[in-house]
Image (cartoon, rainbow, N blue to C red):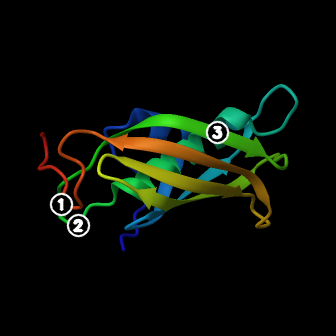
Amino acid sequence: MTDMTDLDPGAAYHALLGLTLVHWEDGFARLACEAGDAHRNRSGIIHGGLILSMIDQAAGYAGLWCSVPGHVRKAVTLDLDCRFTGQVKGGRLIAEGRVAQRGRNIFFVRTEVFDAAGQMVAFGASTHRWRAGSETHEGQPPGA
């Protein structure tokens, strides 16, 4: 298990959205975001793109846990779907991704997003492919 406060510093998109990786272990990742004015759409609710990004990122991290400190695993998203079950005006959002199944090169994840009150506001399923060298839990050395 790894508890972290920041996602990959090389991923500027995470910083732009304000995502934080709060729990990470093999097959599971929990991300948080303090959603506020910058995340709202013209209707005054949190933009669905933020929630969809949280689903994608939590799912990816769930399949990318690495057992060797300093090594990394990489993947690409092949397919992603989302169902919105509620609206959010702001506050803390939590996305939890769980690997449902793994193959040699592909992994499948189910992800749920919750508002500050613990109500599910969205859920999704996604398919990801490990990039070459990332298929095992040992991952790749830095810079590989």
Residue at x-position 77% and y-position 48% = 90
Question: Which residue position holds label 2?
Answer: 67
Asked if marks 1 and 2 touch (Cβ < 8 Å), the reply is yes
Question: Residue 68 versus residue 128: which sits nearer the camera?
Answer: 128
Circle nearer the N terminus (1, 2): 2
Q: Amino acid at mark 3?
A: Asp
- Residue to which mark 1 is pinned: 138
Q: Which residue has dot 3 on it?
A: 81
Q: Give the alpha-carbon distance from disc 1 to disc 2, as whole Å.
A: 5 Å
> Image point 15% across, 49% down: which residue?
140
Say which of 70 and 42 sits in front. Answer: 70
Query: Could you say where residue 22 lies in the image, as x and y percent from the top left?
Result: 48, 64
Q: Quadrant of the C terminus?
A: top left
The crowd level at tag 1 (other Cα within 10 Å; few <14, some 14-19, many 20+) is some
Q: In the figure, is residue 115 to the left or right of 112?
A: right
Decide if residue 99 is in sight here: yes
In the displayed structure, 131 sits above or below 20; it is above
